[in-house]
Image: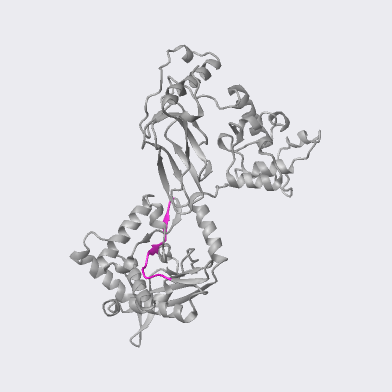
Amino acid sequence: MTTMTDSSVREFKMPDVGEGLTEAEILKWYVQPGDTVTDGQVVCEVETAKAAVELPIPYDGVVRELHFPEGTTVDVGTSIIAVAVGDGAAAAAEPVQEAVADTPATAEAEEPKPEGRQPVLVGYGVSTSSTRRRPRKGAQAPAAAQEASAAIQAEMNGHGPAAPAAPAAPAASVTGDRPLAKPPVRKLAKDLGVDLATVVPSGPDGIITREDVHAAAAEPATPEPQAAPAAVAPAPSPTAAPTSYDTTRETRIPVKGVRKATAAAMVGSAFTAPHVTEFVTVDVTRTMKLVEELKQDKEYAGLRVNPLLLIAKALLVAIKRNPDINASWDEAAQEIVVKHYVNLGIAAATPRGLIVPNIKDAHAQTLPQLAGSLGELVSTAREGKTSPAAMQGGTVTITNVGVFGVDTGTPILNPGESAILAVGAIKLQPWVHKGKVKPRQVTTLALSFDHRLVDGELGSKVLADVAAVLEQPKRLISWA
C-alpha cells in the first residue's frame, strides 16, 4: 500500500461567491471519489442566497472525498472536497481498491478493475460498472444501514417501537466523525443541549432535521417500558398534540437559498427602517398611448416596450428633481449617504423566488438604452442566470404588483435603500376628465420610504412627480 501524506491532499473550501455571503447549499456534485479533475473543471453547483453558481476546482488531481452530500448547506470557508495532487494522485486510487476488497464478493467483483478512473464530462455522471466508492469512516455496512432505515421508517409510521433502531442511527448520520446536519440545526441542538451523535436522522441521506432534534430533546432519559405499545396506536386523537406532522395533510418546505435570504432581509428591513407608505391614484391614459406609439417606432424595434419602461423613466426623473431620496442610512457612522448615481432595482418573481437585480447607472441611460437593459434584466432573471453582482449595490427599487391584478400594496424596503415604488394594475375606470366622467386608464402607485432620512415632504414630492410624468408623459422632455 502506498502511503499518502497530508501534503499531497488539497482541501477546496466553499468560497464566498457574492459580497458578504456566509453559506451556500450544494445543489449537485459533478464528480465522485476516484474521478480525475483538472484545473478549472466545474466540480459542483451551489446555490447562495442570491444565485446558483458553478464552482471550478483550482488544481489538477484525483478526487479523494466529498465532505458533504447534495442538499447540504455549508458555511463559507468550510472544506467541501479533498483532492489528491502530485504524487498523492497516483496513491489516491489504492484505498478505493482496498475498500472494494473488504466488501462481500459479487459477480461484479470478479471483473478486472481498471488502474484508475478517467475524467468525467460535466453533467454526464460516472460509470458504476468498473469502480466503487470508498466507504467513509464510521459508515454502516449495507445490511445494517437498511435495517436502521427500516426501523426509523417504521417508528415514523407508527408500526413499530423506536428502541431497536436507536443504536444504529448515529452511525447512519455520520460522515467521517461528524453527524450530517445544517448549521441552523446544529445551533438548535446546541441550544437544547442535544448531542447530535445520539439523534436519529429522518432526512434524506441521513441528514438530521429540526424535528429530529426536537424529538431527541423531548425523549425521557430512561425510556418507559410501556412506551413501545403507544407507538402502535392506529391514529392519534384529534385533540392530542401531534409529535410529528402528517405528510398526507401537510407539506414542509425547507427555508433556504433565495427565500431564506429574502426572509432575513425583509425582517431586518421592517424592524430597522421606520417605514412610511404614501399612495396616489393617477390617470395614465396618455402614458398607455405613448407605449403603443413607441412600439411602432423603428428606434425601439426588438426592444421591450411596456408601461414599466415609462414608469421607470418617470421615477428616474423624479429622483433627478429630488436627489435626496436616493440615499442610505449608515448606522455605524451615523451618516446619511446620498448617492449621485441610480442603480435601479426591478423586483422579479422567478422559480427560485423573489430577486431584485438592478440596472447599473440607470440615471445615465436614454429611453432606448433603458428599454434594452430592462429586457435583458427580465430575460436573465427568468432563465435563473442572474449573477450575484447584478443584485448588489441597488439604490432604489420598483416592484410591479399590477401584473398579478393587484391594485397596489405597501412594499418593504430593500436593505440599504431608502425608497421603493409599487405599481398597481392599470385598469379602465370611470374618471373625471375635462369636467366629464369618461373611461380612462387608471393605476395606483405606492411609495414606501425610510422615515429616518426621508420626511413626508420629500416622499410626497417624489411620488407626486412620478404621477405627474405618467399623467403628462411630455414632461419627460422638459424635466429629464
Q: Position of residue 149 (x, y in %)?
A: 62, 30
Please say whether residue 64 is visible from this viewpoint. no
Colour theme: one colour
Magenta stretch: includes residue 350: yes
Which residue is drawn at the image coordinates 38% and 52% (left, top)? 387
Which residue is drawn at the image coordinates 73% and 45% (left, top)? 237
Residue farthest toward the left in the current orientation of the protein: 298
Residue farthest toward the top in the current orientation of the protein: 110
Which residue is drawn at the image coordinates 56% and 66% (left, top)? 272
Q: Position of residue 345 (x, y in %)?
A: 40, 63
Residue 190 figure quarter: top right
Task: Tell me the magenta residue range.
Answer: 338-351
Q: Position of residue 152 (x, y in %)?
A: 65, 33
The answer to which of 33 and 370 lies nearer the viewer is: 33
Magenta stretch: includes residue 55: no
Which residue is drawn at the image coordinates 43% and 65% (left, top)? 401
In the displayed structure, would residue 126 be above or below residue 446?
above
The answer to which of 226 and 266 lies nearer the viewer is: 266
Please say whether residue 448 is visible from this viewpoint. yes
Q: Is residue 121 left or right of residue 170?
A: left
Residue 397 figure quarter: bottom left
Which quarter of the rendering shows the C terminus? Answer: bottom left
Residue farthest toward the bottom in the current orientation of the protein: 435
Q: Is residue 171 left or right of residue 69?
A: right
Q: Is residue 480 left or right of residue 451?
A: left
Q: Position of residue 364 (x, y in %)?
A: 30, 68
